[in-house]
Image (cartoon, rainbow, N blue to C red):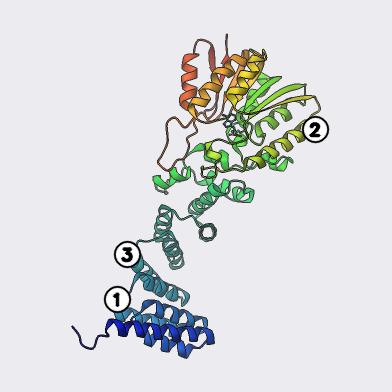
Amino acid sequence: MNSSAPSFSEQILAAEAAATTLATAQREASSDLAKAAAAQGRHYPQIIIEAADLLRRLGEPEAALDLMGEGVELDGPTAPFQQAYSRHCREAGDLDGARQWLRGSMLRARPNAGMALALCEIELGRGDQAAADEALELAIQLRWIDAPALRYAADRLTAAGRGDLAAIPLMMMHLRAKGDLSLRRELAPLLQAHAPFERVPEAVRSRLGLADPATLADVAVPAGSDSGHQFTNGWFQGAAKSVWDDLVPQIDPTRILEIGSFEGASSCYLIDTLATRKDIEIHCIDTWEGGVENAADGWSPANMSDVEQRFLDNIRLSVDRAPHKVDVHLHKGRSDLALCKLLAEGRQGYFDFIYVDGSHQAPDVLCDAVLAFRLLRENGVIAFDDYLWKEPLPYGVDPIRCPKPAIDAFTNLYCRKISIISAPLYQLYVRKLCE
Ligand SMILES: C[S@@+](CC[C@H](N)C(=O)[O-])C[C@H]1O[C@@H](n2cnc3c(N)ncnc32)[C@H](O)[C@@H]1O
């Protein structure tokens, strides 16, 4: 054992003396005391880091850098020390040094998303786009979720002309704040331009829904926002409107039933389109409790009492400006009960058009489909939304937490009583041929 090495108790006393000196240096804003503290506490990386930070704040960046350099040689740099050294190098404009020390710390400690993001920025500063992409992908894989960091990265990547990569942090922000219209205005064209995001690893693509056509619908900026309605999503606009523009005038329904109304985008479309020419009757069923996806920990959280209020305001707006009478019936509650009640009231074969867009769980959709069929008149049409929708779950896709198996089961079992209307897939349209 080296007899000159300080004993454990001497080390503790030295650390305590260094910490006291450093505290005084910070209080008195003294660079001399900062240097003295670093000398006293030279075996303690945290003392050197804080002393260097103080020197930098006091306008002595070179002394700060020297201190960090000496600290590295003393005892083998810890990961936090290397990170701090990287920060000092970066602030001094030495991007190669910043990169070297940050990568060192990432090798020594388990890297986190903040480290990967910092590395991405350093690589961008060095002009190494490929390395920046790699670091950004690492940040995403490390579940980097801090909103200011995401915003910062999106801006940096946009400024660097990498809209494809900028879409990724924006998408991550969007998943947390779906109502943010300005974010969607920014994101929608990037998704349009860069889909299917071939350069993004498959795991990231599927987690963010970048490969899913529903994503575009979700992000699309709803036209309603310019028409006085308050819609916080573009589901209807993206997934349905272009087909409905052709289909609805052909069906020309007068009695309409909607299962799942949310903020009323689809109902308002039907009122705005049909009540310009004739009186209509529209029934809206919704719990206004949201589906599992709208829960606080779901992938699309929503405050459902706000949603319900927006539904009421939106419908009122459309009804008030419709030239013809609109007879609106609200059925607040679960669709299975509401549909049974409509049947019990004698409305079998009553409706011309039924839109099934409530729960997305296969057993619920099957129940909605069977009861809707009973309520539909011959030649009437059922539109199923989200035929191809898949819930982005952390463990992948659950085959029965989506409408498709239920719609497939219904169309198979009712194949002698229905025909499928040819239309671009995402929604599925079914005409009733007979009882
Ligand atoms: C996708 S949103 C409907 C979107 C709406 N059609 C549009 O175009 O904007 C689904 C709605 O179904 C409702 N819902 C979910 N499960 C339900 C159930 N079992 N019964 C009634 N409504 C339900 C939710 O509260 C939610 O508002």
Could you say where residue 133 lies in the image, as x and y percent from the top left? 42, 57
Q: Dividing the image into four equal quarters, which quarter contains ligand 1?
A: top right
- State whether residue 421 appears in this view: no
Residue on which disc 1 sits = 76
Q: CA distance from mark 1 to mark 3?
A: 14 Å
Q: CA distance from mark 1 to mark 2?
A: 75 Å
Residue shown at the point (54%, 15%) measured from the top left: 419
The earlier-in-sequence mark between 3 and 2 is: 3
Crowding at dot 2, Cα within 10 Å, few <14 / some 14-19 / many 20+, comes out as few
Residue on which disc 3 sits = 107
Q: Is residue 258 left or right of residue 397?
A: right
Q: Is residue 88 above or below residue 252?
A: below
Could you say where residue 399 lies in the image, as x and y percent from the top left? 42, 31
Residue placed most toward the observer, 180 or 272 = 180
Crowding at dot 1, Cα within 10 Å, few <14 / some 14-19 / many 20+, comes out as few
**Within the image, what quadrant is residue 65 found in?**
bottom left
**Within the image, what quadrant is residue 74 found in?**
bottom left
- The three-letter amino acid code for the residue at tag 1 is Gly
Residue shown at the point (60%, 47%) measured from the top left: 184
Q: Is residue 44 left or right of residue 225?
A: left
- The three-letter amino acid code for the residue at tag 3 is Leu
Is ligand 1 less than 8 Å from the beta carbon at label 3? Answer: no
- The three-letter amino acid code for the residue at tag 2 is Asp
Is ligand 1 less than 8 Å from the beta carbon at label 2? Answer: no
Element marked by disc 3: helix
